[in-house]
Image (cartoon, rainbow, N blue to C red):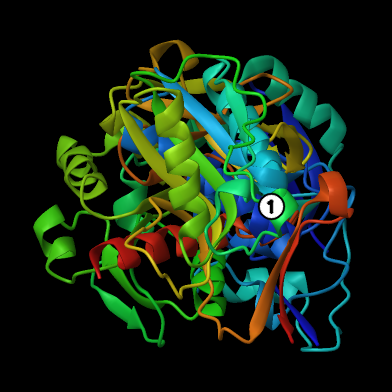
Amino acid sequence: MTQRFLILEDGSSYPGEGFGAGATTTGELVFNTSMLGYQEIVTNQIYHNQIIVFSQPTIGSIGITHDSYESILPTAKGMVVRDVSDISKNRQRSLSLDQFLKQHNIPGISGIDTRHLIRQIQKNGTMKGSIVDVDDDHAFDQLHATVLTNQQVAQVATPVPYPNPNSGYNVVVVDFGLKHGILRQLSRRKCNVTVLPWNTDAQSIISLDPDGVILSTGPGSPLDLPESVLEMIRTIQERIPLFAIGLGHELFALANGAEVTALPVAHHGASHPIRKIITNEIIYALEGQEFVVDGESVDRDRLITTYRDLIDSSIQGLRHRDYPAFSVQFFPDGAPGPNDSVDLFDEFIEIMGTREELHG
Amino acid sequence: MAKVVVDAMAMQRALTRITYEIIERNKGIDDLIILGIKTRGIYLAQRIASRLKQLENATVPVGELDVSKYRDDIEHDSQENDPKVTVAKIDFPITDKKVILVDDVLYTGRTIRAAMSAIMDLGRPQQINLAVLVDRGHRELPIRADFVGKNIPSSQSERIKVSVSEIDGQDSVEIIDR
């Protein structure tokens, strides 16, 4: 293990030990409080451009497994952990987190006081950081000079359509940088899926005659995407059952007149209880959001609030009053868990079923 | 032999979906009233009303209908041959209201016809919609549901058993071979 440094925009430097790739990396620092699922987290494309700090002290203790990839080519910029485990054997495959990160050219740093670091992020808000070999003035200059792209969706979403054939309902997934959990849940329910690029227009979607449309998760700000995406959503929701997740939810809200703002501190983890308003149940789900729908801006004549975070009472779900169109901010696909809201996919299937009976 | 075709989770989802569909179809819940039929329809009606209250923060009145005496497919013995409707607990006006009639199973349609006659005797609603947890087919009258929890194509030799936790200790729909 070699000594490396995590340096931050505020001038601080944290010495630690490098693991994974040895490259120099720069990204936005976010922290994730999930107790499990490091592989799903580091492969989730919402972390494009970001260095993920894990609050769970030991990371890597079950190696890398076949069924926990959320993307083919992960694009997170780095991992910061207190303690990395080099366990490379699990019952499915022999690959350690360290080897995996080397394969994908993602640097990691361990031996960091992550509790202290997370308090700094909570206090100062989002900061840029770098994992570097030497924490000299040059490294800080480089860090300050780095401008991160705001074209994250275009970087990670599929540029071309592709099918995932099956025998059930025809579902179009509009890909803003989807996590595989969405496809996995549709696959379990035998949906015949076509994944389309994020900038597909409504007419191209309608011409595929889908029973339902999903707007996927993805990285970055919904405000950086063009108005044409919102027009697509407004056209689709009037005609076809719609289920929007994560970034898709933020876009669905924007398309229906609500406003979306940046959170002072991003939510990444599964520790927030969420109230399902219609039945007054408490559920837990993995959250990964830097933006939030502004509750004041929601037009109650158009949208119904369906889920709320109980810690900060932020909006976690919406539903259109006039159409079978609904959205959740959190990730319901159980990858990693909790699985409390996986049955939202069943709800989506059942809505498609109702429409089929109505229209024959 | 009994086979569970709708479990507790699926029943919750069905009632949730029906609730959203009611809001969609009626453009809100103004002038809405819900009437549950007999035993289990009443509990389902109350659950839909409580969901609407959670979402809209407004109370939708729930009434109860007992139409057993009104059905023309039940043979009554001479003592019970009373055609009077037993209408339990509708303590609000229904004229010009939008009625959501709720029952557990839609089968021949005769119960619903009887319920509609009973409602018409009480006033003149603006419209009547029908919500059922299960549509099992085999209609004998031209009646269809506006909101269906689950379509269960069944043979007439089978029995559909709906259980609700309020009185049966569990939420489920089972098909039982007779």
Image quadrant of residue A108? bottom right
Against B128, residue A241 (above or below) is below
Residue A209 % position (x, y): 19, 69
The residue identified by callout 1 is A79
For residue A57, side relative to residue B25 (left or right): right
Image quadrant where residue B27 sits: top left
Element type where label 1 sits in the image: strand
Q: Is A135 on the left or on the right of A254, as rendered? A: right
Task: Name the one closer to the observer, A257 or A13.
Answer: A257
- Please tell me how crowded label 1 is: few (under 14), some (14-19), or many (20+) other residues with Cα within 10 Å: many
Q: Which quadrant of the rendered structure holds the C terminus of chain A?
A: bottom left
Q: Quadrant of residue B138?
A: bottom left
Q: Which corner quadrant holds the N terminus of chain A?
A: bottom right
- Residue at left 64%, top 40%? B66
Q: State the residue at coordinates (48%, 36%).
A: B118
- B85 or A205: nearer the viewer: B85
Give the amino acid type for the residue marked by disc 1 in the picture.
Met
Q: State the image coordinates of residue B139 (x, y, percent, origin top left).
A: 42, 70
* Chain on which label 1 sits: A
Q: Is residue A161 visible?
A: yes
How far across and how far down the image is residue B47, in percent? 66, 37
Task: Indicate the position of residue B45 as horizontal and vertical percent values.
Answer: 61, 38
Compared with B36, B160 (above or below) is below
> Which of B152/A30 is in front?
B152
Name the outermost residue toward the front: B78
